[in-house]
Amino acid sequence: MPEALLTVKNLSVDFHTARGTVHAVRNVSWSVHRGETLAILGESGSGKSVSASAVMNLLDTPPAEIVNGEIFYEGKDLLKISYEEHRALNGKKIAMIFQDPLGHLNPVYTVGWQIVEMMTAHGRPIEMARARALELVTRVGIPEPEKALKKYPHQFSGGQRQRLMIAMALMLKPDILIADEPTTALDVTVQAEVLALLKELQEETGMALVLITHDLGVVAEIADRVVVMSAGEIVEEGTAREVYHNPRHAYTRKLISAAPGKGAIRHLEPEAPVLLDVTGLEKTYGNFTALKGASFTLARGQSLAVVGESGSGKSTLARVILRLEQADAGTALWKGRDLITMAQRDLLAIRQQIQMVFQDPTQSLNPRMSVYQLISEGWDIHGLMPDRKARRARVEELLEQVELLPSHCDRYPHQFSGGQRQRIAIARALALEPELIICDEAVSALDVSVQAQVMALLDDLRAKLGISYLFIAHDLGVVRDFADTVLVMKEGEIVEQGPTEAIFSAPQHPYTQRLLAANLDPDPDIQAQRARADRIAP
């Protein structure tokens, strides 16, 4: 093998906190060669992102401390060079795509200004930078790219913001791209396009790609080698095929067994009473129609999945039903009462029965409130559970249900990873024991094993309490395992709906067929067969 482009040797990183020292990374070693894709696979808190941040010199020290290790790029140990030398490398030679695009895009500047800055900060002419920005924004699939460059981050969906981050990272054609969960918020079709783009750029430039992910389908599609991390240590490594078909470590086997899309398809109870009856919902923003006559029913105990690409109207549908946005036309009858025209006083009482888990926990969780305050806030609003001791015990129980620790009660949202914050949001929604939970990409940021546990928890609540779900998702494997009915949305319109089995086995609409064809399988052999078939197809 030729010499590696980037080599991490015996890296150990500690975090010194008020509660003691956390050994986040322990003697981790990995390398990546030019033109190679290395996937670092593991759950939240396993040390994946910490080791990558150390490469980019982005760790806050303190509280972080690099205890030992070496990181070599072009013969230099990056842990020994100056801040100025690191700044010259970051973006130009080594670039990074972050998991949380909203937290890494400046809200007061247009996205075009921020993308162009990637080149101008390294001395490139502004005209060249603008042309490159337009080229990449087009290639990552942003509609109306010239207009998009003049918009601000809040004017894009979560998936679109992630695509903009990818465009920004690729501006200077770096030697190494570190991608921290780059496709977590993307639809299956856009995910396929972005992965194809990354592979295309690798072929053009010989760029090395370090892919931090919990998605086994992404690993199967793009990874050459895999490093599996657990509790700060590497527990297994090998080619993508070796790790999937012959996992040696129990932790790796657990991850593979939790991959969605392999379970039995569920069926709706035929005589369940209707809770929500939606007819002709419409919503327009200026000249853009976000909802076009959406109609469906949702029964008690039903899990109704809504799938479609970013901008298809999925989240708008949920927000209109909850009256977070006002519909322009249509009705949404909750047990016979119209949520769209209901008085605010009556709506407050209904909110206890209908809860929502939002796509972006960074936005939906108040950073000034502790986890205990966030989860118990609903009880204060609705005058429930006055006993403080019982309240504390219930919060701890909810945290354990979503695979967090009772001791996390007194921490704040910024002290958790993206996946852990989403688990807190789910615990908060469950606190009021609602009849309907609207999940807007509620498990998209979770690791596969935690995702499986949370989905099992939601399904258990459905069986025990008759809870219904309006489940907005782009992961079709999760939808297949969890939902009994599927709605497919495109450009604000429901283009197909029906039982999950019918949608997955015999999709009628070309758009639905395209979504299913783009869904990734965790088995590298299946993905390779699909790639060969695509190359042969006319």
Image (tube, rainbow, N blue to C red):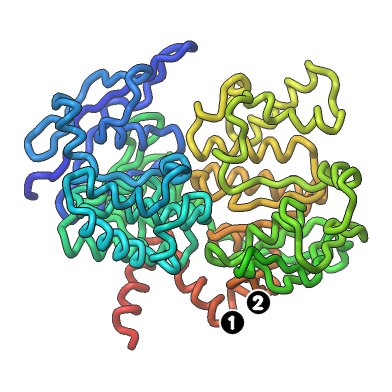
Disc 2 residue crowd, few under 14, some 14–19, many 20+, Cα 10 Å: some
Q: Residue furthest bottom?
A: 538
Q: Position of residue 217 (x, y in %)?
A: 42, 58
Foreground of the two, 451 or 85: 85
Q: Position of residue 129 (x, y in %)?
A: 24, 56
Q: Is residue 73 visible?
A: yes
Amino acid residing under circle 1: His
Residue at left offset 65%, top offset 40%: 426
Q: Is residue 242 visible?
A: no
Circles 2 and 1: CB distance less than 8 Å? yes
Q: Name the secondary structure under disc 2.
A: strand
Q: Give left or right: position of 162 versus 427.
A: left
Q: Give left or right: position of 328 versus 520.
A: right
Tell me the residue that label 2 is attached to.
496
Q: Name the secondary structure under disc 1.
A: loop
Q: Is residue 411 above or below residue 270?
A: above
Point out the image quarter for the C terminus. Answer: bottom left
Residue at left offset 76%, top offset 68%: 281
Disc 1 residue crowd, few under 14, some 14–19, many 20+, Cα 10 Å: few
Q: Give left or right: position of 362 versus 352.
A: left
Foreground of the two, 59 or 160: 160
Residue at left offset 58%, top offset 48%: 359
Q: Is residue 145 above or below residue 183?
A: below
Tell me the residue that label 1 is attached to.
509
| Cα separation between marks 2 and 1 | 7 Å
Q: Position of residue 467 (x, y in %)?
A: 79, 50
Q: Is residue 455 above or below residue 263?
A: above
